[in-house]
Amino acid sequence: MKKPPIFSFVIIFVLIAVLGLVGLLFVNKTEKTTSPALEYCETIGGTVLTKLDKYNNSHQTCLLHSHIITEGSDAIDNSYECGLEELYSGNCPEEEPAPDYSTPVLGTDNQTMNQQLKTKTDDILGKLKHTGYTHKDYIRNDGEGVSLTDCSGFVGHLLQEEFVGHYNIIPQNYSCTHPLAADYYDYFDGAPVDADTAICWQKIENVADAQPGDILVYKSTENISNDKKTCPNGDKVYKLTSDSGHVMVIHSHPKLSSCKDSNQYYVRVADSTASPHYHDTRAGDAPNNNFRLDYNSWFYEHTKDNGDKYYTHSGLGTGTLWLNKDIEFFRWKSCSGTKHHKDIIIGRPVACK
C-alpha cells in the first residue's frame, strides 16, 4: 500500500492551525464587541440572562441582586429583572414614569408642618455637594454642603432643625444615643388617626392619603431581641442583631401604579441609604439618568454571595419606591420587584398641643 506523501500531513497540519486561528480571532472579536448595555449590567452587580419569548426569539435581560442597607450591616435581597437595553437607557418597560422632579424651591412661611419638613429637605438637597452612607453623623447644611449619615441620622437632623419638640418626644428604646427607625415606628403606631386629637404626630393608615413631608418608616422586628442592655447613663434599651428598620421623608404625592398589583402606589422618598431607589438622584440608575442631581455621591461596597464585589452610590438623595394601599409591603426599586412585608407606618407632624 502506497504511503501518503509527507506534504499531505503538512497540508492537514496547516489547515488545523488556520481553523484554530480563525476560531481564536472569532472569540476575541466576540469579546471585543460586548455591548455597553451588557458591560453596564455586570458593572452594577447584575447577571446577564438569555431568554426565549413565545416565538423562540432570543432576548437578553439583566437580573440585579441588590441589597437594602439601612441602619445596620444586614442586607435584604432585592432582586429584579429588566431588559438589557432598557436598563442601560434608564427606561425599564415595566416601570411607570416616576413623579416629576424639579429643582428644590423653598416655600413660604404659610405652610403646614409637613410642608415645612419637605421645604427643609429641599433646602438640604439644594445645597448638597458631598454625601455618603455612614453611621457617623456629620451634616453641614451650609456652603460646604456635606451629608455623611444613615437614615435615622438624617431624619433626626431634619427634625432637630425644624421641630425639636417632635424629635424629643420620640423614645429611645433601641439605641443609647438617638432614636432609630423602630423608635419612630413605635411612636407613630400609637399615635391617633384623628388630627384633632393628635399630639405632635398623627398616624396615616392609607398611602393614598400621604403627603410630602410625612415620615415613612418600616420596622425590622426580626432583628430586635427581647433582651436589653444598659446604656452609660443607666437607661436600658433592646439589643439588636442588625438594623431596626429604615426611616424616610415622603417627597411627592403618591400616585396609583399601572404595574403589577392593582392597589399599588408609587412615591418619591428622601433618605440616606447605600441602596438607591428607582430614578434616583444619587446617580446610580443609568448613564442618562435625568433625575441625577449635581453632587458627589460616595460609593458603598457590597459583596455578592460568591464573594464578588460591586459598588453603589450612597448617602442622601431622593428616589421612587412602591407601596400597597394599606401599607403592608413595599418594593424598593422596581414596581415588579421583590415584595418586602414589614411593619410599615406613616407619621405626619402636627402641633404639639
Image (cartoon, rainbow, N blue to C red):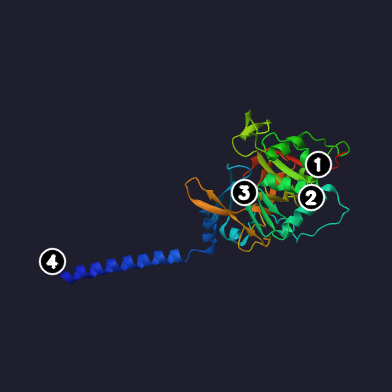
Q: Which residue is under mark 3? A: 134
Disc on res. 93: none
Q: Which residue is mark 2?
A: 117
Helix or strand or loop: what does disc 3 sit on? loop
Residues at marks 4 and 2 touching, judged by CB atoms closer than 8 Å: no
Image position of 96 (left or right of 36): right
Q: Neighbour class for label 2 at 10 Å: few (<14), some, many (≥20)? A: many
Mark 4 or mark 2: whose residue is earlier in sequence: 4
Type of the residue with mark 4: Lys
Q: Which mark is residue 165?
A: 1
- Mark pair 4, 2: CA separation: 94 Å
CB-based contact (under 8 Å), mark 4 and mark 1: no
Residue position marked by numbered label 4 in the rendering: 3
Looking at the image, which residue sits at the far top? 227
Residue 261 visible to the viewer: no
- What is the distance, in whole Å, between disc 3 and disc 2 at their CAs? 22 Å
Depth check: 206 or 226 in front?
226
Residue 2 percent location from the top left of the image = 11, 67
